[in-house]
Amino acid sequence: MRKLRMESNVSPELRALRCIYIPVYGLMVAGDWLQGPFMYALYEQYDYSHSTIAALFVCGFGSSMTIGTFLGCYADKYGRKKFCILYAVLYILSCIMKHFKSLPVLVIGRICGGTATSLLFSVFEAWIVAEHPSEVYLPDTLALQSTTSSIVAILAGLVGQATTDISPLKEVPIGICQGLCYYGGNIWPFDLACIVLIAGALLAGVLFNENYGDRQHLVDSTPGIQALKLVVQDRNMLSLCFVQSLFEAAMYCFVLNWTPAMETDVKAAEDELGIIFSVFMVCCLCGSQLFILVTSYCQWNMESMILVACTIAAITHAQVWANLQLNYVSFFVFELCVGFYIPVMASVKSSFIEEAHRGAIYNIFRIPLNAIVVSILLSGMSVTWSFGVSSCLLALAAVIQYYRRYFLPHDSLSYVSLE
């Protein structure tokens, strides 16, 4: 008979690890969340058209797919702690470049930001999985990570919005900087992001242990090549790669389109964007808490959880596509699905991806995701059609996950009991 895991049984070693990891991860992810609600708005304030803004986002996702994947594959070989710190350095550079109303500078900033994003969603997770002393409690730690991300996002939206009210966007009236360099307004959240990223990098440098993949195996091999072979040759891994890519591509489509959707259909004022973003993150937080409740009181297979999240998310985007008036219910339910999906997917990946190539495989998993998003951005499709495409992506993810769940052999991923 299976028994529920009890947090009272968590070892002191695991508690100490969480006390180290969660604050550092919270600071690092805050550097990302502080930028989210204000990037599109800042580019608009710089008088760039929607097509130019889309091109800037293409640079970010394109660099994540290429440079980020290539760079992230070296984390297993040279140390994941070092690459956690590298993430902060790249994002700080990206934030600094937001001060310049210069398309070449902003492009370089998006390249740095896109590369950093690839590291954020790979090396931190690879680090904590390698350090974790108990597989039984790993899903709880990953859920705690997701909860932390949601809470930080809520605060980032509110604090970021408050900083934009300190002073309006102004140009630096000094010499050659005049008309080129700006400060204030929607740039304040990026400056705050620099501060928290510096704090996160310093803490990671002091508190994190260094861990690697199979260094002996990786010494004479090109990082990523063996990992790519493992993904391609394993049907379970390859299908999971496509499920993740399709779901998260739809998620990024939502990230890119919710701001223009709000502005078009409800005339959302610029000073409401941070508040709206925080409400979305409250829903995401509820999703991660729902994951904890389901896994604590139900013996529900995690493959089934992914299927449910993909199916409900597909319905929400189909609803938005049918009627692109501001649909609070659809947007909020989708964010709930995102909050539920993130710890489930992290738990499933951690269960069977080889430790020696974990960082590389996590980055390879993001290649189709970035390729899909870049294709959508380059197509120049309207906001309405973007939601239509994302609903199809989510539906396809549900179909593939159904195939994974019922037709591919794999170990059941319901929670392990404590005897």
Image (spheres, helix red, strand yellow):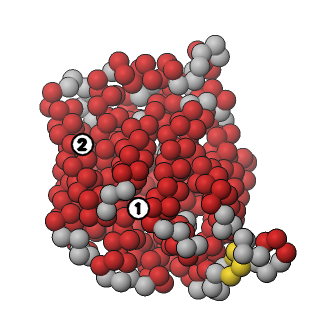
Q: Which mark is residue 397?
A: 2
Q: Nearer the viewer, residue 286 or 357?
A: 357
- Three-letter code, disc 2: Ala
Who's the residue at 55% across and 44% down the image? 63
**69 relative to 7 in the view: left or right:** right
Who's the residue at 17% across and 32% down the image? 403
Badge 2 element: helix
- Three-letter code, disc 1: Leu
Q: Which mark is residue 256?
A: 1
Q: Nearer the viewer, mark 1 or mark 2?
A: 1
Residue 280 position (above or below residue 298)? below
Whole-percent x and y of residue 127? 56, 39
Who's the residue at 37% across and 22% down the image? 232
- Report if the CB atoms under discs 1 and 2 are less than 8 Å apart: no
Whole-percent x and y of residue 351? 37, 32
**Rendered-image quadrant of the N terminus:** top left
- Mark 2: few, some, or many residues within 10 Å (few <14, many ≥20)? many
Q: Quadrant of residue 328?
A: bottom left
Q: Nearer the viewer, residue 2 or 133?
A: 133
Q: Nearer the viewer, residue 278 or 263?
A: 263
Whole-percent x and y of residue 248? 36, 49
